[in-house]
Amino acid sequence: MTETGKKEDRRVRRTKKLLTQALTELLQQKQAKEITVKELTDLADMNRGTFYLYYRDVFDMLEKIRNEMFERLNTIIALHENEDVTAQTKPILLELFRFIAENREMWRVMLSLNGDMNFLHQLNEVLREKCLKLYQATEQNEDEFDYRYSYVVFGSAGIIRAWVNRNCPESPEQMAEMTNRMILSGGIA
Amino acid sequence: MTETGKKEDRRVRRTKKLLTQALTELLQQKQAKEITVKELTDLADMNRGTFYLYYRDVFDMLEKIRNEMFERLNTIIALHENEDVTAQTKPILLELFRFIAENREMWRVMLSLNGDMNFLHQLNEVLREKCLKLYQATEQNEDEFDYRYSYVVFGSAGIIRAWVNRNCPESPEQMAEMTNRMILSGGIA
DNA sequence: ATCGATAATCAACACGGTGTTGACTATCTC
DNA sequence: GAGATAGTCAACACCGTGTTGATTATCGAT
């Protein structure tokens, strides 16, 4: 998707960075739907027309940022392609929580009240294949898979949400262990 | 919140109903942010000004509909106030899934791509107290409660989402049993 | 240091949805 | 039937949008 092949012009990097910072700041205060291009560029202190050089509107910008994050997430997942899915504490979970901690502001915003269902949906898509393998390794009741899978992925999103909302006090190691435990042994009992 | 004490004028009921129908229809096609008051009232075949008699904008309308739904949900939950939380298949879960099936269109929209994080958040709030009781009955590790609770509620939301997306092929009884099982015995194993 | 390329600025524009107004007409409740 | 109130209609100023062309500032590369 994104042409990261050639390094961008310094001015372009600067502009996108300023806009992303401004958007992140505004998303702490209000929902994306309430954010206008005008106030975004006002906050970033740049001409309104500059915004349209890179994004169609605020939601398009949000989508591009989201895609960039999931591209990186996919890279991480791909590195664990041939991993033993029955291992006790999954290294991939640890990597996931480390990645989240590094980008905690964006994850917090995305999973917050002002967040985005698309983010949850995309998270679902990314983890689907991975879950399928885990599922096949444990030979479960087949027609329930969609529900089990939805339960696990959404539940994990809930954990992540609670974690980033508290600004990640626990270590990624703790979180990976806990999440793995909940996935395997259930939420309550 | 909403003054349901006195019965509304027939004209008011008609107007709100038409607007709600139009909104539900439009939400199947596009996101809330893309829906204008103009096209909403055009579709409902009424004067644009009439909309402003009851709602500030499209999102305000969505919020009022959401609140109304959660009011009814709270009523259901309150009826199960003194219930044995250690029972095998929880009657409250059954009631929940029946309620969802009756309002499946709205739940589908609310949990869809075009949905609303506020809905998830409000669902969290409503089920928090109930989960607390369930938790206290099983005497778990205390400092993990927030995470366990988030996992269970979000996970359940995932199940609900998958269910309404398929237009509820399974019965509420089946779903209540399955959800209860996943909450107690985990997502995978 | 210079030069060609291009990013960013600025002013200006038409467009369309917004939210509100006042006068009217239609419909409801009692 | 009478008084109250909901809905209609036309009109209004307002504001953000998305785009334009001309100008200036900054970049990367030689």
Image: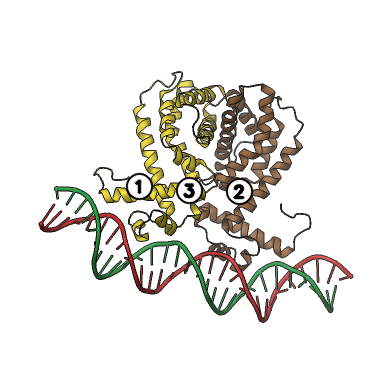
Chain colours: A brown, B yellow, C green, D red
User: Mark 3 packing: few (<14 Cα in 10 Å), some, or many (20+)?
Assistant: many
Cα separation, mark 1 vs mark 2, equals 38 Å
- Secondary structure beneath disc 2? helix
**B122 shown above or below D21:** above
* Dot 1 alpha-carbon crowd within 10 angstroms: few under 14, some 14 to 19, many 20 or more: few
Three-letter amino acid code at the position of disc 1: Lys
Query: Distance of mark 3 from mark 1, alpha carbons?
Result: 15 Å
Residue A119 position, x and y percent, is: 59, 45
For the N terminus of chain B, give its image quadrant.
top left
Kindly tell me whether residue A167 is visible in this rendering: no
> In this figure, which residue is indicated by the disc labeled 2?
A106
- The amino acid type of the residue labelled 2 equals Met
Question: Secondary structure under badge 1?
Answer: helix
Marks 3 and 1: same chain? yes
Nearer to the camera, B65 or A83 = B65
Q: Based on the displayed image, in which of its 4 quarters is residue A37 positioned?
A: bottom right
Question: Mark 2, chain letter?
Answer: A
Q: Chain of mark 3?
A: B
Q: Is residue A119 left or right of residue B105?
A: right
Which tag, 3 or 1, sits closer to the chain's start? 1
Q: Residues within 10 Å of mark 2 (few under 14, many from 20)?
A: some
Q: Residue at x 70, y 37 (%)?
A: A95
Q: Along the horizontal axis of the image, is C21 left or right of A140?
A: left
**Mark 3: amino acid:** Leu
Q: Same chain, marks 3 and 2?
A: no
- Could you tell me which chain the residue with mark 1 belongs to? B
Q: Position of residue A153 (x, y in %)?
A: 60, 34
Q: In the rendered image, which residue does mark 1 sit on?
A: B17
Of the 4 image quadrants, the one containing the C terminus of chain B is top right
| Residue A153 drawn above or below residue C13 | above
Q: Which mark is residue B27?
A: 3
